[in-house]
Amino acid sequence: MHRKRLSVAILFAFATLASGQALPRPDVPEKLAAPPNEQVVLSAQATGSQIYVCKAGSDGKPSWSLKAPEAELRDSQGAVIGRHSAGPAWKYKDGSEITAKSVERLNAPESASIQWLLLTVIDHSGKKGVFTHVTSVQRINTQGGLPPADADCNAATLKTELKIPYSADYYFYAPTK
């Protein structure tokens, strides 16, 4: 049911964009709200993996560490429109790219899912395009993606990489014109 509501919301958002109006902001906790002088310029559904590696921590104990996300970004019709990778970074199909850093995080409502994030863009690269003016990114509605249990990271599994499936909704913001 959640996916159906989300699909309807995304379809409405694209219809609104086609009419020249800004996309609606998602309903998120205030801590994750993008700055008020920014508007949503793109929303996308990501599906892929969070890649974890078992390695010795600063205390010498083995633990799972996030290596990188690896996901496809899809539009409301399911077409691939970009990729999400280490950095964290996003590349849109027009060649525009951004890298961001997390500035706020909250535990997901579902305890078996990775955190919701608000990120600030720290670098723009690639061609001029959709991401050229993006300044903030939200990751919400996460499903899955948590690291394996710490007990599964030990001397025998050091350097092991595991891909944990996840999905999320990403909202990309740029300053209001």
Image (cartoon, grey):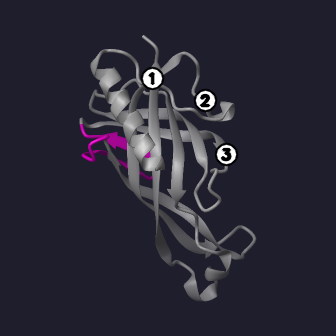
Type of amino acid at the residue the image marks with label 1: Ala
Q: Alpha carbon of mark 1 to alpha carbon of mark 2: how far?
A: 13 Å
Residue sitting at 31 percent across and 15 percent down? 20
Residue sitting at 51 percent across and 20 percent down? 38
Q: Alpha carbon of mark 3 to alpha carbon of mark 1: how far?
A: 22 Å
Is disc 3 placed on a helix, strand or loop? strand
Q: Is residue 71 above or below residue 51?
A: above
Q: Is residue 87 magenta?
A: yes
Task: State which region is magenta.
Answer: 76-93
Crowd rating for badge 3 (residues with CA inside 10 Å; few <14, some 14–19, many 20+): some
Number of marks present in the image shown: 3
**Residue carrying label 1:** 174
Image quadrant assignment for residue 125: top left
Residue 131 seen: no
Residue 59: percent from left, percent from top = 75, 71
Residue 42 seen: yes
**Residue carrying label 3:** 106
Where is the C terminus found, in terms of image quarters?
A: top left
Identify the residue at the far front of this view: 1
Crowd rating for badge 1 (residues with CA inside 10 Å; few <14, some 14–19, many 20+): many
